[in-house]
Image (cartoon, helix red, strand yellow):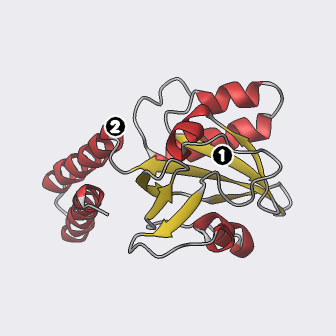
Amino acid sequence: MSGLNFIDPERVIDAAIAAARRGGESLAAALDRIPAAVYLTDADGMVTHFNRACIALAGRQPMACEDRWCVTWRLYTEDGRYLPHDLCPMAVAIREGRKVRGVRAIAERPDGSRIDFAPYPTPIFDAEGTLVGAVNLLIDLSDPRYLEFLRSQSARCRRLAASVGDARTKEILTTMAADYEEQVRQAARPN
């Protein structure tokens, strides 16, 4: 995981899942090397492991085997409505056995401050296809590393689009670039 100096959500999630599958005493150290808030739950949504970045993002010390669904103190939807933890994106991902993407939420810390973030809850299945837990990456939408990643992905798509002759591929790449640029605009939008 040493190459994770920027926040590529899917790459970070893959690294966290690999660490969880290895398990052992190195799990905490492996999670702490991830450059963003990451936590793991069991199949019932109980938080089992989290990294130091979770503490910083949530503004509190999560309680392993006590907190369920999320490490945050309180959650709100992007339009400011209270979001109970049992309805949060992680709860949806575990109950429905699917990744949840494209969601934005607001975490309230015990000191009353709030942080706008994007969750990336992802179920973890064993070799037989049984849900064994989940990993969630919480990206602070104001994190300059994440914004730079989005901008670099947009530029990469535009470079590729300019280099291909196939109209359909060019259209797909141009759409992808616009999607990354929209994510940057959304991240810059105030709560």
> Compared to 190, does 13 lie above or below?
above
Place residue 184 in its image quadrant: bottom left
Q: Which residue is drawn at 38% across and 75% down?
A: 79
Sequence order check, earlier mark of 1 and 2? 1
Residue named by callout 1: 39
Residue 68 marker: none
* Percent position of residue 64, x then y: 78, 44
* Quarter of the N terminus within the rendering: top right
* Quarter of the C terminus within the rendering: bottom left
> In the depicted view, which residue is nearer to us: 124 or 129?
124
* Percent position of residue 92, x then y: 65, 72
Disc 1 from disc 2: Cα separation: 19 Å
Q: Residue at x 50, y 56 (%)?
A: 108
Q: Which residue is drawn at 50% across and 47% down?
A: 111
> Compared to 24, does 58 lie above or below?
below
At mark 2, the secondary structure is helix
* Percent position of residue 185, x then y: 22, 60
With 132 as the anchor, is 177 left or right in this view?
Answer: left
* Percent position of residue 166, x then y: 20, 65
Residue 145 marker: 2
| Number of numbered markers | 2
> Compared to 174, does 8 lie above or below?
above
> In the depicted view, which residue is nearer to us: 166 or 140?
140
> In the depicted view, which residue is nearer to us: 150 or 91?
91
What's under tag 1, amino acid-wise? Answer: Tyr
At mark 1, the secondary structure is strand
Residue ranking furthest to the front: 111
